[in-house]
Image (spheres, grey):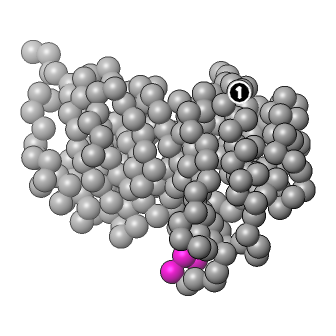
Amino acid sequence: MEVSHQRYFIEIAFDGSAYHGWQIQSNAETVQELLDKALTTLLRRPTATVGCGRTDTGVHAKQLFAHFDWAAAVFPLEEREFLHRLNALLPHDIAAKRLISVAPGAHARFDAIKRSYEYHAHLRKDPFLHGRSWLLRDAPDVPAMNEAAALLYQYEDFSCFSKSNTQVFTNNCRVMRAEWQWLGNDRLVFHISANRFLRNMVRAIVGTLMEIGRGEHAPEYMHTVVQSRDRAMAGTSVPACGLYLTEVEYPYVEAI
């Protein structure tokens, strides 16, 4: 008798300070490694997840989806009990938020239609923001940075912001939002959304915008950077502590 398989999406959030990113590595602790171990313990069978993408060392996630398969028609736990038990097995800085039954062919990585990030920076020393936001020495020129950020909408090839030697089919992305906003008088957040992102892309974009915000380049310099397709032309990657994956959208998963 053929055993049916059911696929599930699990939504998690994590503080990435203690981890070498999402994806499993042979020589460092990662979020995926701990999630897979907890699922294997809870479900009492080897369980491996596939994530919606990778995050770098120290990067946080307010929302990240991964999928896994259950080789039976009926899942052994209701969602509430599953989340309660799984969270008891996970460390304090990783939280399971939702379990969603999806079609057998659904894919956490390839089916995502939009991903959103925030980059947080602050101007006044704050112990409660340490490790979660980048402390700036001086206030940058936000209108100039937003003028430069808006130029990203004109392009698709973002090779200039990609880590070198990455194994991807294309460096093309479609940016849907890119803007800075003030949070009060001494905190800044950069919002960026796209259909996909390259490795290190957001941190390199923010680094380039910060150079413009410090007056080192005019906003139009963004054209030169993107058209060069050369990582050396873009700004230095900003610290990982301020970066958050905030939302991943699918056509069949309800946003909450």
Examine the image and state in which quarter residue 158 appears. top right
Residue shown at the point (73%, 69%) measured from the top left: 139
Q: Nearer the viewer, residue 241 or 146?
A: 146
Residue shown at the point (11%, 27%) measured from the top left: 73
Percent position (x, y) of residue 84?
A: 18, 60
Res. 124 in view: yes
For disc 1, the marked residue is 154
Percent position (x, y) of residue 205?
A: 72, 46
Are there few (<14), some (14-19), or many (20+) residues within 10 Å of tag 1? few
User: Given the image, on which type of amino acid does mark 1 rest?
Assistant: Gln
Q: Nearer the viewer, residue 50 or 196?
A: 196
Residue 130 painted magenta: yes
Q: Most prominent secondary structure in the magenta stretch?
A: loop
Percent position (x, y) of residue 230?
A: 86, 35
- Give the side of residue 93 with respect to residue 148, left or right: left
In the image, residue 14 sits, relative to residue 253, either above or below, namely below
> Which stretch appears magenta?
128-132
Res. 19 in view: no
In the image, residue 123 sits, relative to residue 140, either above or below, namely below
- Give the side of residue 192 with respect to residue 246, left or right: right
